[in-house]
Image (cartoon, rainbow, N blue to C red):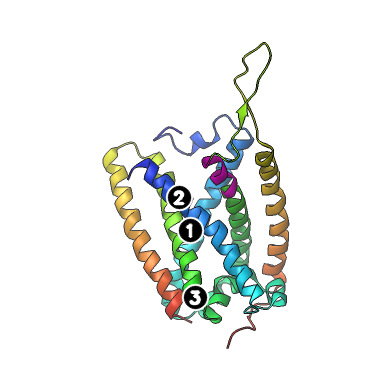
Amino acid sequence: MRAGRGVLEWFRRLNLERIYFVIHRLTGIYLVLYIFPRPYLVLLSGSWEEALRLDMTPIGKMLAIIFIFSILFHGINGLRIVLIELGLISGRPLRHPIKPIPALRANKLHLTLIVATIVLTVVGMVVGSYLVLYGKEHLLVGP
Amino acid sequence: MKASTERLILITGALVMIIGMPLVIALALLLGKIPFEEVLTTHPLVIIPYAFVKIGWGLIWAIVAVDWVVHGSHGIRRVLIEFIKSERGRKIIDLVLNIVMVITGIIMFYVLVFVS
């Protein structure tokens, strides 16, 4: 990634890894924008229950659904990135008998995590969206 | 900040969240602090983090939440410095984000532990 090139740099030479990278970045930015104002909101409104009222409006619910997608994708894909960074699922070179092919053979766990990222995000988002739209809005636990 | 230090903070933060969040939720469920039926039928934002505040686990969740703030600040820093060419501009972004991170972290801790 070259400095000072802007967002277009993210979309240069798109492939599966790069698409995951772009979504990871966008979901990360959304998570920061969604979570960072939250403590200030609670502090200003004086209680968690007051702050939660905003989440129960139609716009709040829409933002919550995007939040669920973001946290699922960012979390599961983040796990994959951490495992790559730690060298646990890094690829190994392809060994062609004649030609020296400059490519990596992906680790099986890596491929599994690529598929799991999509599957778990979709499943989690379906369940999460249902609960956001139709779930109980008051908690019946605690003292 | 050195790139290796930033990477270390980001990865450590990510690991704390990836392991910490499911662990705290699982513990609250296993110990019966939050009924499983409630989790399966309630709006997720009512559960996280409000349920933890209500059952008195705000301090435990605050560890995850403050880590969330640190990880988010460093992530945003990583994105923003890609758009800035000058070293001075990067240092300013560093300073501003560090201030935002510390203030947000303290307020996050305060609202989770002391506001109900």
Mark number for residue A16?
Answer: none
Residue A101 x/y as whole percent: 63, 18
- Answer above or below: position of A100 versus B77: above
Between A142 and A48, the residue placed more toward the observer is A142
Residue A118 is left or right of residue B84, and the answer is right
Residue interval drawn in magenta: A79-86
Mark number for residue B58?
Answer: 3
Asked whether residue B43 is in view, the answer is yes
Name the residue at 61% across, 69% down: B25
Looking at the magenta stretch, what is its main secondary structure?
helix
Position of the C terminus of chain A by quadrant: bottom right
Between A98 and A29, the residue placed more toward the observer is A98
Q: Amino acid at mark 1?
A: Leu
Q: Amino acid at mark 2?
A: Leu
Name the residue at 43% across, 32% down: A2
Query: Which residue bears the numbered disc 2?
Result: B10
Residue B87 is left or right of residue A51, and the answer is left
Marks 2 and 1, how far apart in space? 18 Å
Query: Which residue bears the numbered disc 1?
Result: A33
Q: Are marks 2 and 3 in contact (CB under 8 Å)?
A: no
